[in-house]
Amino acid sequence: MLLTGGSGFLGKVTIEKLLRITEVKRIYVLIRAKNGQEIKERLVAWESDPVFEILLKTQPKAMQRVAPIQGDCQEPDLGLGAEDRKLLIEEVQLVLHGAATVRFTEPLHIALAINTRAARLMLQLAKQMQRLEAFVHISTAYSNCVVEKIEEKFYPEHLTCSANQVLELTEWLEGELIDNMAPALMGKYPNTYTYTKALAEQVIQREAGDIPLCVYRPGVIIASYKEPMPGWIDNLYGPIAVLYGVAFGVLRITRLNVKAQAGIVPVDYASSMALATVWQTAIDAKPPGDPVIYNFTPSEENLITWGGFRDRAQNLVHNYPLTKMMWCPFLHCTTTPWLFRLVAYFYHLVPGYAIDVVLRLRGQKPRMIKLYDKIHKNINVLAPFVDTTWKFDTSNTQRLWKRMSSLDQNLFDFNMRGLNWDDYFRQALYGIRIYLGKEQPTSIVRGKKILFRFLVLHRILQLTLCSGAAALLWSLLKVVSSF
């Protein structure tokens, strides 16, 4: 199997699952040198990653089945050497293409190279593979977010121009010029991520040819539910950043429509679904017509709103408090931009400036205002995705689940109908505390004591502010009545 994006969140979980419960002989992982580390050094470093801890206890030599391949999806030839290319063409039977830049604010020319051009290059490589049985292109449920009802089909009609035309532009123009053209090219798409993923889908639709291929569209991927361990996460993307900010006592107001549906899926469910699509695509070979598309989001019978997300997080964060919290956790939500800016001034900026003054007086570098500037930018970027309810057709996904045997359903569980959201959030909040907060399980008691002190201070502050406001109002009323 060839897997791109193996060093990412979903990629690591997928590799771990393949090694732990299947007899895969070799996983070729496209990987690039990074931060002074060569590819083999990066692979060795994975062995100390918590995601592989359980696997390596039972199978100490499991990572020997993973073969790193020097490559870079940003390069015009995928950064592949001649020998590695020949090896992949001769040996690979299954391709799981998940490499992508998920930054919403990525410059357009970079997002095009990684998310769109690389999809075409991977297709061209796959067509040369002598033993290919299945190719799965991992897209996103929000690749067509310009419509509110997203079916399991392609939507090329919403692009301002074809993927082929845009990629031709990247060959002739400098990156800066492409970035300047972004508003005109993107049209209604809210960011470069969703736009370039939509373009990649058109590449797949037009150029897949006769290879066995499907498109897999997972929703917002968040912390694991059960595998490889409950609550595992290694990043601060999307809603997880909100959870962490609240738990830390830094984020107190955000833009969020509490009535909108949340298209969130646990990473272990997303990984199991990805592997199931590989299996089904290999069985189907090449069906007539367009490639099959699988939308993967919460089931209509078991939906969750962003309000439900917030409420569960707020309740449980008191059960698993961080010892490093800066204030007691609470979160207010609004969909009104001007109200968010007003409240953020008092909830974020005023305390931030106060803390920075104290830090300066101590001879330390101020950091809170820079942090809040970053938080506010991220909130504005995410706003369209937490303010709208999309309806997703998941018919193909449901059919795939029913085709699986009970044994396979147990091994590759992605049934969102049966997911217990209350239990999930208990696991997720506990995991965030350990894997992001770097807190020890034994420090929960200490965290609760710190939380209690902050709650007392919070009530005192509220009483002081309310008393001050009442006194000011009384004084104004006396002045007015004296006239």
Image (spheres, grey):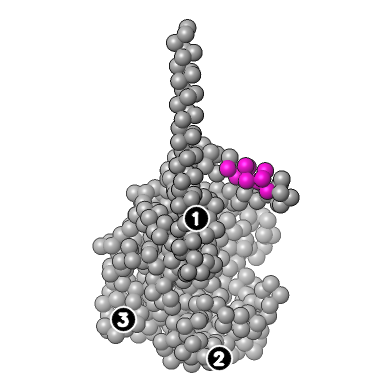
Q: CA distance from mark 3 to mark 2?
A: 27 Å
Q: Please give left or right for residue 355 compared with residue 9 in the image.
A: right
Image position, residue 222 (x, y; %) = 44, 65
Q: Quadrant of residue 32?
A: bottom right
Q: Which residue is mark 1?
A: 450
Q: Amino acid at mark 2?
A: Gln
Q: Which residue is mark 2?
A: 64
* Visible residue check, residue 178: yes
Q: Secondary structure at mark 1?
A: helix
Q: Quadrant of residue 269?
A: bottom left
Q: Residues within 10 Å of mark 1 (few under 14, many from 20)?
A: some
Q: Which residue is mark 3?
A: 410
Q: Is residue 35 above or below residue 246?
A: below
Prevailing secondary structure of the magenta residues = helix
Image position, residue 230 (x, y; %) = 41, 72
Q: Amino acid at mark 1?
A: Ile
For image coordinates 55% across by 91% down, the residue present is 64
Image position, residue 46 (x, y; %) = 57, 80
Q: Nearer the viewer, residue 282 or 298?
A: 298
User: Magenta stretch?
Assistant: 351-359
Q: Is residue 405 above or below residue 434?
A: below
Q: Earlier in the sequence, mark 3 or mark 1?
A: 3
Q: Earlier in the sequence, mark 3 or mark 2?
A: 2
For image coordinates 43% across by 92% down, the residue present is 23
Q: Please give left or right for residue 425 compared with residue 378 in the image.
A: left
Q: CA distance from mark 2 to mark 1?
A: 45 Å
Q: Amino acid at mark 3?
A: Asn
Whether residue 141 appears in magenta in the rendering, the answer is no
For image coordinates 57% across by 72% down, the residue present is 118
